Image: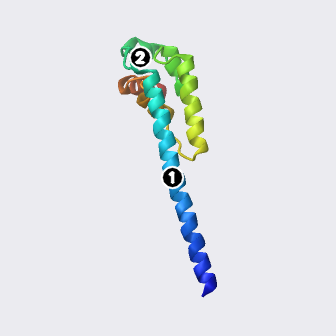
Amino acid sequence: MMAQSSNYNLLQENQARYNEFEDFESEIKAVILQKLLEADKQRRFSRPVCRQATKLLKTGKPLGKLLTETGYVAAQELETALNLQAMLDRLDNHLPLGKLLVEGGYVTAEQLAEVLQAQRR
């Protein structure tokens, strides 16, 4: 009976720790995304969608490379987003690069869709 009680207490403690970790992880993600949005608030949607950009795109290249080639994303912005993606991966919460760039205000959903469509050709 004592062993069952001890196991139950350990289970409760572990569940509490897990819940605390999930809360902490959510807070970190919110802070990181908010910082990205604040840092680039002025740039949001400043680049127009350029249909001519698809001529520059070549299949087989990584998304980040294509976005920098079209001028939608600066190299430093891409590096910031890739670092954030790596940090989130370490927390076992992978987010696609495109989603990070759109949520961070680096590119519009239209720009991302254009590049992804060209990438698939």
Q: Nearer the viewer, mark 2 or mark 1?
A: 1
Q: Nearer the viewer, residue 26 or 82?
A: 26
Residue 117, quarter of picture: top left
Counting from the top left corner in percent of width and height, residue 69 is at 52, 15
Counting from the top left corner in percent of width and height, residue 8 is at 56, 76
**Disc 2, SS:** helix
Mark 2 vs mark 1, CA separation in Å: 32 Å
91, above or below 35, in the image: below
According to the picture, the residue beneath numbered tag 1 turns out to be 22
Res. 43 mark: 2
Identify the amino acid type marked 1.
Glu
Q: Name the residue at the right extreme.
A: 3
Q: Name the residue at the bottom extreme.
A: 1
14, above or below 89, in the image: below
65, above or below 88, in the image: above
Callout 1: 10 Å neighbours few (<14), some, many (20+)? few
Res. 35 mark: none
Q: Residue at x 44, y 21 (%)?
A: 40
Q: Residue at x 51, y 41 (%)?
A: 28
Q: Nearer the viewer, residue 65 or 35?
A: 35
Label 2 or label 1, whichever comes before in sequence order: 1
Residue 34 appears left or right of 18: left
Q: Residue at x 58, y 24 (%)?
A: 79
